[in-house]
């Protein structure tokens, strides 16, 4: 029986987990040690597919007669180039853009409750006492 076998396997497992955490941190993604590897791969594939769909939808809304300096056309061209050169960078770029858009247009806050009017607040209540 070799004691080094199980100990070496444990050391290799801990080393692989540490490398996975470092890789996830370097990619800017959260690392959940309890997340299944298959669930992580599914989430990443889902996000990649969603990014492709968003870019395709944006490209379909491209203005027909846009000139070479049209800002909408330039942004769409840069998104298409990002999609070809680095899909991961495009995904992160869209996440940041969506976050900024959500911060720019926050959900409507509920209306504050109406305060009692000043006239009603100043009016003292009469107490009915029997003085007679």
Image: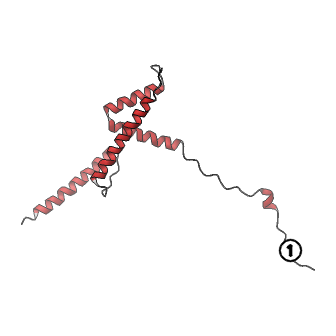
- Residue linked to disc 1: 128
Q: Report the residue at 37% width, 39% height from top.
A: 91
Q: In the drawing, does residue 50 fall left or right of residue 122?
A: left
Q: x, y percentage for residue 23?
A: 28, 47
**Which of the 4 image quadrants contains residue 8?**
bottom left
Q: x, y percentage for residue 45?
A: 32, 44
In the rendered image of this protein, does residue 98 appear above or below residue 60?
Answer: below
Q: Report the residue at 77% width, 56% height from top.
A: 117
Q: In the drawing, does residue 100 fall left or right of residue 79?
A: right
Q: Nearer the viewer, residue 49 or 15?
A: 49
Q: In the drawing, does residue 18 fall left or right of residue 123?
A: left
Say which element carries label 1.
loop
In the rendered image of this protein, does residue 4 appear above or below residue 22?
Answer: below
- Label 1 Cα crowd, 10 Å radius (few <14 / some 14-19 / many 20+): few
Q: Which of 23 and 44 is in front in this view?
A: 44
Question: Quadrant where the N terminus lies?
Answer: bottom left
Extreme left residue here? 1
The number of numbered discs placed on residues in the rendered structure image is: 1
**What's the image's color scheme?**
secondary structure
Extreme right residue here? 132
Q: Report the residue at 85% width, 69% height from top.
A: 126
Q: x, y percentage for residue 12?
A: 17, 56
Question: Quadrant where the C terminus lies?
Answer: bottom right
């Amino acid at each position: 029986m070799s004691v080094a076998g199980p100990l070496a396997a444990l050391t290799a497992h801990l080393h692989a987990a540490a490398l996975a955490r470092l890789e996830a941190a370097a990619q800017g993604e959260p690392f959940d040690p309890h997340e299944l590897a298959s669930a992580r791969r599914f989430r990443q594939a889902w996000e990649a597919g969603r990014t492709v769909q968003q870019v395709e939808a944006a490209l379909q809304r491209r203005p027909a007669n846009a000139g070479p300096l049209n800002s909408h056309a330039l942004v769409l061209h840069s998104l298409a180039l990002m999609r070809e050169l680095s899909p991961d960078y495009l995904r992160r770029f869209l996440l940041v853009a969506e976050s900024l858009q959500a911060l720019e247009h926050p959900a409507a806050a509920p209306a504050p409750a109406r305060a009692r009017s000043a006239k009603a607040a100043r009016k003292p209540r009469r107490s009915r006492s029997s003085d007679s």
